[in-house]
Image (tube, rainbow, N blue to C red):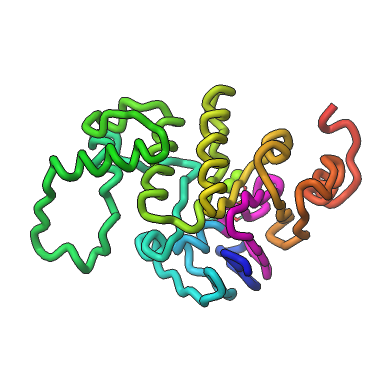
């Protein structure tokens, strides 16, 4: 009944055990917050899920089916999409070209792939409008703000029928208005049945947008709750591993 399940995920880097037996269960059509202090292993867990890192141990299930995700391209085609903390788009290419990039499995490219630019631009415009964005697909991606680039990444994920969209600290460089715009898109996706994994340190955002929460600490799994069942104080306590007072005065 879970959209995504990660079981017993471990990952070491030289000298650091970044993940030690992590579990994560995400329901269909939900926003699942992943919380933990800086260095807890949140980004590493998502990079393992997305095939950027190879996990040492662990299993991933998508709609109950065991997945072996070998790289980000593979992840995308299996229904996972990731909006990175550090965006990696190609700013000097157009919005449409960025939306096309990585869309087709590499094996189908053949030696020479001729792209019909008119069709590409029309398709990109349709995908953007589908998430209520009205950018000119021919504009260079680099002319957009960070939040607009994130919106393009999300539109791309939606157009590829992503079942799970990972947002890694997406609001760190956004204004309040941009955060609200992002949240409208997130809610719209959730209402369409997409599952979102939302990495953030910001308690107010978690309260506003998340349904469930999983907390990690020092590369270990602490626990999972419905957001309505856990207080801010308890979240902080679970994140840092001890009682704290006055850190959010
Ligand atoms: P978070 O996203 O929760 O802030 P990270 O997943 O970025 O945490 O990091 C978890 C731990 O793994 C940290 O100790 C970090 O230094 C280490 N780590 C992450 N990526 C690498 C890497 N590529 N090489 C070595 N150590 C890494
Ligand atoms: Mg970090
Ligand atoms: Mg991180």
Residue 73 % position (x, y): 35, 61
- Residue 117 location (% of width, % of height): 13, 42
Q: Quadrant of residue 151?
A: top left
On the image, which quarter does residue 177 sit in? Answer: top right
- In the foreground, 10 or 212: 212
Does the magenta portion include 64?
Answer: no
Examine the rendered structure and indicate whether residue 103 appears above or below residue 210.
below
Which residue: 63% across, 60% down?
A: 27
Tag count: 0
Q: Is residue 119 left or right of residue 91?
A: left
Residue 132 in the image: x percent, y percent? 41, 34
**Is residue 242 toward the left or the right of residue 185 in the image?**
right
Nearer to the camera, 4 or 222: 4
Q: Residue at x 39, y 34 (%)?
A: 149
- The verdict on residue 43 being magenta is yes
Residue shown at 24% from the left, 64% from the top: 106
The one nearer the camera, 243 or 187, is 187
Residue 52 seen: no
Is 144 left or right of 206, judged from the image as shown?
Answer: left
Residues in magenta, as a range = 18-45
Q: Position of residue 32 (x, y in %)?
A: 64, 52
Point out the image quarter for the C terminus.
top right
- Is there any visible trace of residue 13 in the rendered image? yes
Whether 152 is drawn above or below 54: the answer is above
* Quadrant (top left, top right, bottom left, bottom right) of the N terminus: bottom right
Quadrant assignment, res 98: top left
Q: Can you say whether 102 is above or below 155 in the image?
A: below
Which residue: 8% across, 59% down?
A: 112
């Amino acid at each position: 009944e879970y959209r995504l399940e990660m079981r017993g995920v471990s990952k070491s880097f030289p000298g650091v055990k970044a993940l030690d037996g992590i579990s994560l269960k995400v329901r269909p059509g939900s926003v699942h917050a992943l919380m933990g202090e800086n260095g807890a292993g949140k980004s590493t867990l998502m990079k393992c899920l997305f095939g950027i890192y190879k996990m040492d141990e662990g299993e991933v299930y998508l709609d109950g089916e065991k997945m072996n995700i070998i790289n980000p391209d593979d992840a995308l085609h299996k229904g996972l999409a990731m909006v990175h903390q550090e965006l990696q788009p190609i700013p000097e290419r157009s919005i449409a070209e960025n939306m096309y990039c990585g869309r087709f499995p590499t094996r189908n490219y053949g030696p020479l792939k001729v792209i019909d630019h008119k069709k590409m631009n029309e398709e990109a415009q349709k995908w953007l409008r589908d998430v209520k964005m009205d950018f000119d697909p021919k504009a260079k991606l680099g002319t957009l703000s960070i939040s607009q680039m994130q919106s393009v990444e999300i539109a791309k994920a939606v157009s590829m029928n992503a079942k799970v969209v990972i947002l890694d600290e997406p609001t760190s460089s956004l204004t309040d208005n941009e955060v609200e715009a992002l949240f409208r898109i997130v809610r719209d996706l959730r209402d369409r049945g997409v599952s979102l994994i939302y990495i953030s340190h910001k308690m107010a955002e978690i309260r506003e947008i998340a349904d469930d929460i999983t907390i990690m600490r020092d590369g270990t799994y602490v626990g999972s709750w419905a957001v309505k069942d856990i207080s801010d104080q308890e979240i902080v306590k679970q994140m840092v591993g001890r009682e704290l007072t006055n850190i959010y005065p």
